[in-house]
Amino acid sequence: MKITQTKEIEAPGLGEKIKTARLATRKPLGELAYKAGMSTANWYRIEAENMKSMSIETLRTIEKVLGVDFGVKFPD
């Protein structure tokens, strides 16, 4: 039997933080998006916060590719 729990939290300004971290790497967006397993268009949508939500897995992948921790945590 599977038990599922879904949680959502607000992360205001996360898109801008991702963009700032990306620019600080001085690496091409295409390279970073490829390493994250997504299209450049999708990455731009995340930075512009034009998406209703993003999975925690996607965020953790972006953090890994950029080498940063944005401090997004779910309460216990």
Image (cartoon, rainbow, N blue to C red):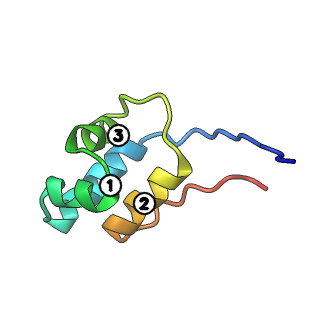
Q: Distance between the residues labelled 2 and 3?
A: 13 Å
Amino acid type assigned to the residue bearing label 1 in the image: Gly
Amino acid type assigned to the residue bearing label 2 in the image: Thr
Question: Circle 1: is it few (<14), some (14-19), or many (20+) Cα within 10 Å?
Answer: few
SS at mark 2? helix
In the image shown, does 64 or 72 lie closer to the viewer? 64
- Eyeballing the image, is 37 above or below 44? below
- Number of numbered markers: 3
Could you say which disc has been placed on residue 61 in the image?
2
- The single residue placed furthest to the right in the displayed view is 1
Could you say which disc has been placed on residue 37 in the image?
1
- Eyeballing the image, is 51 above or below 42? above
Q: Which residue is labeled 3 in the image?
A: 46
Amino acid type assigned to the residue bearing label 3 in the image: Ile
**Residue 29 percent coordinates (x, y):** 17, 54
> Residue at the location (63% across, 40% down)?
9
